[in-house]
Every structure is written in structure tokens, then in C-alpha cells.
Amino acid sequence: MIAPSVTRPTPAVPAPRSAVLILVGILLVALNLRAAITSLGALLDEVTTGLHLSGTVAGVITTLPALAFAAFGAFTPWLARRMSPARILVGAMGLLAVGQLLRAVSGSPWTFVLTSAIALAGIAIANVLLPVLVKEHFPHRAGMMTGVYSMTLILGTTTASAASVPIAHAVGDWRAGLGVWALLAAVAVLPWLGPALRRTPGSAGTGQATRTRIRPAQTRLGWAMAIYFGAQSLSGYATMGWLAKMFRDAAFTPTDAGLLLAGVTAIGVPFALLMPTLAGRLRDLRPLVLLMSAAMIASYLGLALAPHAGAIAWVALLALGQAAFPLALAMIGMRARTGEGVVALSAFAQSTGYLIAALGPLLVGVLHEVTGGWQLPLGFLIVAAVVQAFAGLAAARPRYLEDEAGLVNGERAVPAPAS
């Protein structure tokens, strides 16, 4: 039997001026990827009072981001087969801007939920596309670019969380603190308008309609990436939702507890920049996977045993552990040969992963309510970190999605007859 060979397409490297515009566009999109979520988190008490939200609706709103990322992220490959990434991003940032604006002026709880879902749909689509754009336009600097946009995402997350309440107080209305971020989403549309309006041979989408679809759900690599992405996201969402409460229960003041939570993000910025670059230079990613999972486990053990005495150390270890997020984004681009493969793997890993992640804050809250303490919830997070380690070790093996799916240049591989 003669095995079919696989030819890697040569990535298109943009001209310097075009590369700068694309980079600016990517960073502006990244700046928007969590602002709609953290601005609401900062103003949730005011929104709950202003719209008379029930506990059920407030719970739906806090779970909505992960569910929306799962649902709308899975829809992105269908779009990518029909439109260019630039046109999709114009639509995604448009949805984000309109959704944030409409929810800021909405007068009913369920209208608020619906318009929030519209905004989150735009984020979900952009989440999937950014690893594709990095691989396509910066193939020789993919690790560094992934680090840069991950750091920008963190900057947007922190800025929206810190600035939304002061903006609302300055204007005298919580609606201003939410609606102002629609302007940032509108600005992110601008760099993509020119490429979206140009008609090029590849503008119909990243793949041809006649090509065989790549189905990550039918591969071990696809599931390894999805579980790895989901487990680390579960930890991230649980941390955002409950870490400050853990520190308050450990006798920290509300202000200090908030500062410790912010410290996870602040300390994590250099890790977010470094981790994808380091991943791009290493042949074996398993030591990185193990390092970050071990840091998470050590942090959770510390929080369970000595939350007050070692708080700064546990925050630093957790920040290192959460660098698994930019590493997962980098691995998505590294585990596919083609643009179609990256879209498919990104969509499956993120949509399935965020569905897993949605369980994190809910289960931590339930376990805390049942036991009245944090030992069992932290034990659950340790188990999640162990699962993350095993899935990460499987995903870290150097292989490609198209090979596992039996594809050659986007077509189903048919073995040649025996010679």
C-alpha cells in the first residue's frame, strides 16, 4: 500500500502595511472579547435593582456567556465556508455593538437577556476566528501574536471591570456603564471594512463548499482539545465568580478580596504574553501542560488549607495556572494544517469547552451551599485540574487534525491501490 502524501499549503504572508492593519484589527477585536461580560459583572447589583431581576433571571444572565459561546461558536464554521473572515468579523462586531447598546436601553428582564445574547453571539464568533487569522496572516510569529492578543484580551477584561462602575457613577445611571462599550465594538469594525468590501478569489470563505468537512468530534485530538479547553475555562469562570468570596470568608475585607482577585489578572499578563511564544519554540508541550496544572492544584490546596496566610502565593500560582488559556489558543493553531482545520478545531474546542465551563460556577456554588465551606468546592476544582492535565497531555502530542480525520488537502484520503 502506498500512503497518500499530505502537502502543506504555503501560508499567505501579508504585505507590511496590510499586516499592520490586520494586527490592529485583531487587537481591537481582542479588546472587546470580555468587556461585555465583565462590565455587567461589575454592575450586576445595579442592573438587578434597576430591572427588578429575579434570582432565576440573574442566574441565567451569569451563566449566559458560556452557553452563548458554546452555541454560537459551533455555528462559526458554517459561516466560514461562505464568507471571508473579514466579513464575518464586521458582522460579529456589529452584533456586539448593537447588542450592548440595546441591552443598555432595555426596560424588561427578558429583553435584557435577549440583547445580551445578541452581543455574546458576536463574541462567540470572534473567539473562534482569531486563532485562524493569526495562523493565516502571521504563520511565522503565531506564538508571539497569540500572546499579544491574549494579553490584549486580558487588558480589555480588566479595563471594563474597573471602569464600568466609575462611568456609571459619573453619569448617574448604570446604563451608561454598560452602553459605553458598544462604542469600542463599533471601533473594532473599522479595520475590517476595507478587506470585507474587497472581492478577492478567497473571499467566499476559508474553504470550498465541495470539500469534505473536517469533523473534530470524530477524532481523539478534537476531544482532547475540547476537554483541555473546557477544564481550564471551568477553572477560570469559577475563579471569576467565587475567588473574592473565598477571600472574604477568610477574613479579608471586601476591598482586599477584590484586589486579590484583580491580582490574578495582573500577574497573569506576562504569562499570557510568554506562554504562546514559548509553546511555538518547544517541540514538546507536555512540560508546560504539567506545570500549569500543577500550579492550579497547588493554589487550590493552599486556598483550602491556609487561605489567609498564603493568599499572595495562591494568587500567583493561580495566575500561572490560568496561562493554560493562551496555551490552549496557541495549540488550536498548532494542531491543524489548514485554515479549514483551524476553524473546525477552534469551533469544536471552544463550543464544547465553554459548555463544560458553564458547570464550574454552578457546581462550586452548589457545593459551597451544601457544605457551608470551601474545602469540597476546591476539591472539585482540583479534580478538574487533574482532568485538564490528562487532556492537555493528549492534545500536546505533535499531530494534526486533518491526519486524524483522514484528509489530504481538504479531501477524504483514499489509499492508493497496491502496486
Image: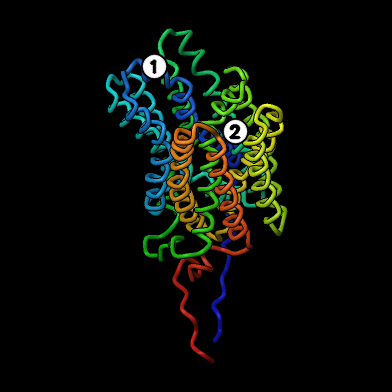
Question: Which residue was labeled with disc 2?
Answer: 152
Q: Which mark is residue 358?
A: none
Residue 240 versus residue 363 in the image, above or below: above
Quadrant location of the C terminus in the rendered image: bottom right
Q: Choose between 240 and 133: the one closer to the eye.
A: 240
At mark 1, the secondary structure is helix
> 270 or 243, which lies in front?
243
Name above or below for residue 115 compared with residue 281. above
Could you say where residue 85 lies in the image, as x and y percent from the top left?
46, 46
Q: Give the percent coordinates (x, y) of residue 354.
A: 46, 45
- Mark 2 and 1 residues: CB-CB less than 8 Å, in contact? no
Q: Residue furthest front?
A: 371
Q: Quadrant of residue 144?
A: top right
Would you call the spot at circle 2 few (<14 residues within 10 Å), some (14-19), or many (20 or more)? many
Residue positioned 65% across, 30% down in the render: 307
- Cα–Cα span, label 2 and label 1: 25 Å
Q: Is residue 318 above or below residue 286?
A: above
**Number of marks in the rendered image:** 2
Q: Residue at x 45, y 53 (%)?
A: 348
What colour scheme was applied to this rendering of the protein?
rainbow
For label 1, the residue is 175
Which amino acid type is marked by label 2?
A: Thr
